[in-house]
Amino acid sequence: MSLLAVRNLSIAAGSRLLVEDVDLDLAEGEVLGLVGESGSGKTVTCRALMRLLPEGQLRIASGSIDLRGRDLAKLSEAEMRKVRGVEIGMIFQNPSSHLDPVMRIGDQIAESVRYHEGANPKDAQARAIDLLRQVGIPDPARRIAAYPHEFSGGMRQRAMIAVALACRPKLLIADEPTTALDVTVQAQVLRLLLDLRDRLGLAILLVTHNLGVVAQTCDSLAVMYAGRVMERGSKRDLLRAPAHPYTEALLKCQPGAARPAAQLPAIPGQPPMASAFPDGCRFHPRCPRAADICRRERPALLPVEALPVKPLSVKAGRVAACHFAAPMRAAS
């Protein structure tokens, strides 16, 4: 049984859909990578799962977000406040803008423990010290008194992870957790996330555009483009033999995929603006295999091994939204 099951999730700005019919499944202890170019709808989708969309600007238009048998899309704001931090934690893309600059790190971690669990200040502080130790902050008993500006970028990211894990959630959403970090610190943060997964049984939804990060960390992948899921399946399948032209193009754009001294390939054109999504398949203006049917008809997300027999079964494994989907050997 899935810990998290998202079905037909659509997110709207006014009457315009920015994200449409997203399906995701995440089991306990699994790392699911949500990948795609900037503007694909990854972060908006994650904020919708947390019910943190900007009020009056974006809204959940349809769909369900089932977490352990409860549909988060139907909960009131008061009920969601009991879910955030307790059942779902989130690491935001830029820790500098999400950590309070005038509040000590230890107090920011302890605040959640005191609010949700009613812990006294002494016990909450002890939890904060322990969490900083778990995420690899040296001398945590002294560091809890530091302010965010006294931490390096990598330490701020670790502190944000500690804040997200303060009340022991079972699901952690990590939105580009290695952005703006140097390569060495990126590797340390990724190792930390996997170690926490192994020790605490965390399920992790990892948002990234870096397929190198995906290869190191994820068990399964969902590839998004222009607000829709283009392909979903195990990491091994998608990286070795992508079934959707967009997934194949992303892999070819990775530095390791090009021959030495050869020019790095790029996907022609630009992702569409949300106000000008094309008809049919949203990738067809940039797709080398596009045909008339791609311009006319939106492809359904179908099992690759059964195309084009039946609509997506929520229990299906490898799926792709392409009229001509077929596993293709990835470039080496």
Image: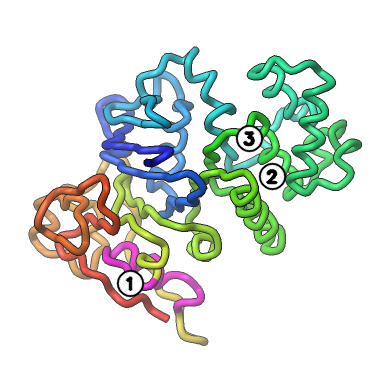
CA gap, disc 1 to disc 2? 34 Å
Query: Per the image, is 58 magenta?
Result: no
Task: Please report the residue visible at 34 percent of the width from the left and 27 percent of the height from the top.
Answer: 60
- Using the image as rendered, state which of residue 70 and residue 278 is in the foreground: 70
Q: Which residue is mark 2?
A: 157
Instruction: Find the magenta span and give its range.
Output: 240-257
Q: What colour scheme was applied to this rendering of the protein?
A: rainbow
Front of the two marks 1 and 2: 1
Q: Earlier in the sequence, mark 2 or mark 3?
A: 2
- Using the image as rendered, state which of residue 232 and residue 167 is in the foreground: 167
Q: Residue furthest front?
A: 1
Main secondary structure type of the part rendered in magenta = helix
Q: Which residue is mark 1?
A: 241
Q: Secondary structure at mark 1?
A: loop
Q: Amino acid at mark 1?
A: Ala
Q: Which residue is mark 3?
A: 164
